[in-house]
Amino acid sequence: MMPLFAIICHDKPGMLEARINAREAHLGFLRNEGIVRLAGPLIEEGEMRGSLIVLEADDLESARKWADQDPYKAAGLFASVDVIEWKKVIG
């Protein structure tokens, strides 16, 4: 099994409409390569305001390059994107 990486993204304020408009492209991107192990939106005050993605990649640089291709990033949605190695312990 390849290493796992968590991608934690926080949206810029007021970007819900941009998120909704880019959602289908984003979901297609997540499904495309078969490396995403889990993913979903971060919720604040009942509204989608970020993303958490866990994927398999060869190394941190590969995970970062993958994250840079996300349609949400291309839509200018994110205020920040953190990519860190993650180890599954339970679940």
Image (tube, rainbow, N blue to C red):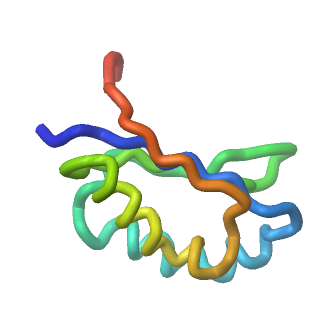
Instruction: Answer yes or no: is residue 50 visible.
Output: no
Q: Is residue 54 left or right of residue 22?
A: left
Find the residue positioned furthest to the front: 61
Examine the rendered structure and indicate whether residue 62 appears above or below residue 44. below
Residue 57: percent from left, percent from top: 24, 51
Residue 59: percent from left, percent from top: 25, 48
Q: Is residue 36 left or right of residue 81?
A: left
Report the quarter where the C terminus lies: top left
Examine the rendered structure and indicate whether residue 43 appears above or below residue 25. above
Quadrant for residue 50, please give it. bottom right
| Residue located 16% across and 42% down the image | 2
Quadrant for residue 88, please give it. top left
Residue 21: percent from left, percent from top: 67, 82
Instruction: Answer yes or no: is residue 13 visible.
Output: yes
| Residue located 46% across and 69% down the image | 68
| Residue located 73% across and 60% down the image | 79
Report the quarter where the N terminus lies: top left
| Residue located 68% across and 64% down the image | 78
Residue 9: percent from left, percent from top: 61, 53
